[in-house]
Amino acid sequence: MAEHTLISEAFNVYFASAEEKLRPKTVHEYKKDIEQFKDYLGIKYPHVTDINAITIDHLQEYLSFLIIEKKCMVSTRNRRKNTLRSVWKFLFKVGIVDENIAIQLEHMKERVVKSERPFLTEDEINELLNAIDSTVVRGVVLVLYYTGMRISECLNLTMTDIDFESQKARVIDSKGGKSRTIPINGHLKDILKTYTKRNHIQNKVFFTRSGGLTDRYVNKCLKQATNKLHWNTNVTCHTFRHSFASNLFNKGVHIVTIQKLLGHANLQTTSGYTHITQQSAEEAVELLETNGHLSI
């Protein structure tokens, strides 16, 4: 059993060894951590003077104190935990402490607070469409909302990708590179038919006078429209993908059907629980409706 060892003496033994093995910056940080731990013990448990009198409860209370009282970040708390574990591992190895109590200290996971993904209701989308000055951007917004496409997929859309007769569009997944077929809402089909009769160049569906259309340009137009409406909501191209999914879900469409329409990579895992047919996907998109129109 280790002999009676004062706390400061024990820590000094550790740092004498650490200075030979660790970088000076690391040793400096460890010393700061230990000094703060000693200060905590001195105030909270002044009668504890022997290193072997320190228990796991003392260590855990100190780490909780950092979060609750000091309002430290979880990352700071975890770094102090690592310092304590490193020190006690060494002290146990050289026989200064009877037990490596710090090995019981657990890593604390950071609580990630995810902000809700913004989505627009059908009324808001109608309002926004009326505020967008650009005909081509209104067309992009309608396609994004009615299909759930990614903006890159939408801007790469060609006339040969659209089959008006079967009401389907073929898109290349911008993330996985695989193609998928998306059913086209009947209302969107009528809009696109009218639009593409006069507004496509060569094989491209969406374009500007200067050439290809960019997501940056679309987002700029969306910003102008939301400013006109005095909205505080940050609306981007991706907002319509979320709106597509959220509004379908709110209308009772099964989440797996929505995943299929979005072309999510984890669809294969999810679809093992539910069989989704192309017919159900086609019926799903027909639930969406706006009063949107394109001025030709």
Image (cartoon, helix red, strand yellow):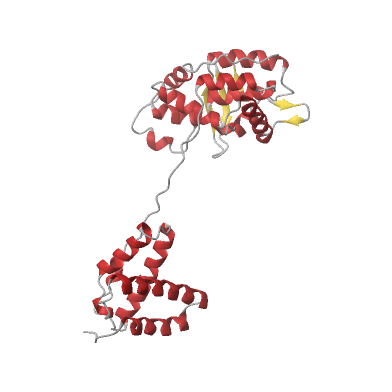
Q: Quadrant of residue 279?
A: top left
List the single residue furthest toward the left: 1
In the image, taking residue 131 as reference, residue 279 lies left or right, namely left
In the image, taking residue 80 as reference, residue 196 lies left or right, namely right
List the single residue furthest toward the right: 210
Q: Quadrant of residue 161?
A: top right
* 122, above or below 18, in the image: above
Q: Position of residue 116 (x, y in %)?
A: 46, 36
Q: Nearer the viewer, residue 97 or 64?
A: 64
Q: Nearer the viewer, residue 41 or 98?
A: 41
Q: Quadrant of residue 292?
A: top right
Residue 156 shows up from this direction: no
Q: Position of residue 14 (x, y in %)?
A: 38, 81
* 64, above or below 94, in the image: above
Residue 110 shows up from this direction: yes
In the picture, the quarter occupied by the C terminus is: top right
Give the residue drawn at x 28%, y 80%.
49
In the picture, the quarter occupied by the N terminus is: bottom left
Q: Nearer the viewer, residue 253 or 111?
A: 111
* 37, above or below 115, in the image: below
Q: Position of residue 127 (x, y in %)?
A: 58, 20
* 186, above or below 18, in the image: above
Q: Nearer the viewer, residue 135 or 197?
A: 135
Give the residue drawn at x 59%, y 22%.
128
In the image, taking residue 166 as reference, residue 59 lies left or right, namely left
Q: Position of residue 48 (x, y in %)?
A: 26, 77
